Amino acid sequence: SNVIYKHFIRNPYYERYIFTGRMMSTFTHPTILGFYFLVTIPTTYYFYKYGDSAKIRITNFVILLLILSSAIFTYSRMALFALLMITSIYLFLKNKIRWIFFVLGGVFLLSLLLERVFISYNSMTRFGFGYLMDDLKHNHRITEFITTINMIKDHPWVGVGFGHYRILFNRYSFVRLPYEIMITDNVYLLYLVETGIIGFLGFSFFLIHLLRSGFQAYGRSTSNIKRMLLFIWLTYIAMLINFFSFDGILWKSSFYLFWLFAAFLCSAVSWRKNN
């Protein structure tokens, strides 16, 4: 239960998710809270691993455990999947290939176990393969995807314009959905439908160039700067993966974090070029 949303501020997502037990805190939606936890995990791990003293490392280890456990209780699958992906990338860059198979295999077995243990509906079943497949068949995302494709067919090059997706939703949708889920649930589809192919290619070029420049700067750096660059770069990748599951640029917290870390990465790349 959330006192703020229960008594003071109407939140349609709170009314939708209160019976599922998904944590949302003051972030309006569980997915946004999951995204926030996802962004903080690499940074916390960095301070745990490279802290200057045992006290700092222990403190950050405890914080890391709290963040991880809280992230699980948001039941945000894509946030945890993004965390799994950047963990695999980190292990690959550290030449710990065997650990990648151990981590992926452990997650696979855990998913099967959860499906067996939680037979009736429970938020934990969201991590099971059976529930995931059923969710893909009956989720509102199918309606959103078809609606998005219909808009793109009519406005392929310059899109429908920023902020017009919801305005035009009912004109292109074959099913009426509540206002709060008249969305693409995908940042890349949102850019494509609202800015068209031209805007989407520009956005894609920016992301590819930023990630490429960041990785090149990481490869040329040494010591502390190299480590810092790696964790900023991995955090940004985690964000981009998570953006496949929700319209992150429409939520203030995820929007600001996205551009904040873009600025961090740009600054680090620029500093490395000038030093």
Image (spheres, rainbow, N blue to C red):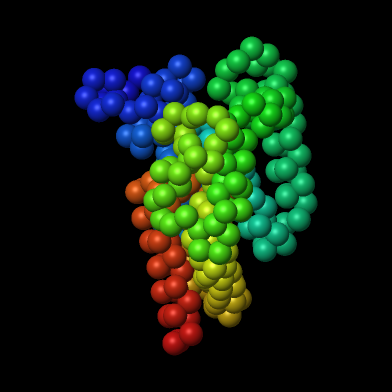
Q: Name the outermost residue toward the bottom.
A: 274
Determine which quarter of the picture holds residue 25. top left
Residue 106 visible to an observer of this rendering:
yes
In the rendered view, would you say 97 is above or below 101? Answer: below
Q: Is residue 257 left or right of residue 209?
A: left
Q: Is residue 41 left or right of residue 119?
A: left
Residue 35 visible to an observer of this rendering:
no
Determine which quarter of the picture holds residue 173. top right
- Residue 235 appears at what percent x and percent y? 51, 56
In the rendered view, would you say 99 is above or below 112? Answer: below
- Residue 158 appears at what percent x and percent y? 51, 63
Q: Which quarter of the figure is the C terminus placed in?
A: bottom left
Point 44% across, 65% down: residue: 262
In the rendered view, would you say 201 is above or below 55? Answer: below
Q: Which quarter of the figure is the N terminus placed in?
A: top left
Determine which quarter of the picture holds residue 142. top right
Q: Name the outermost residue toward the left.
A: 8
Point 56% across, 71% down: residue: 205
Point 46% across, 69% down: residue: 265
- Residue 26 appears at what percent x and percent y? 32, 34
In the image shown, does 227 or 125 lie closer to the viewer?
A: 125
Counting labels gives 0
In the image shown, does 49 or 54 lie closer to the viewer?
A: 49
- Residue 159 appears at what percent x and percent y? 50, 58
Point 73% across, 50% down: residue: 100
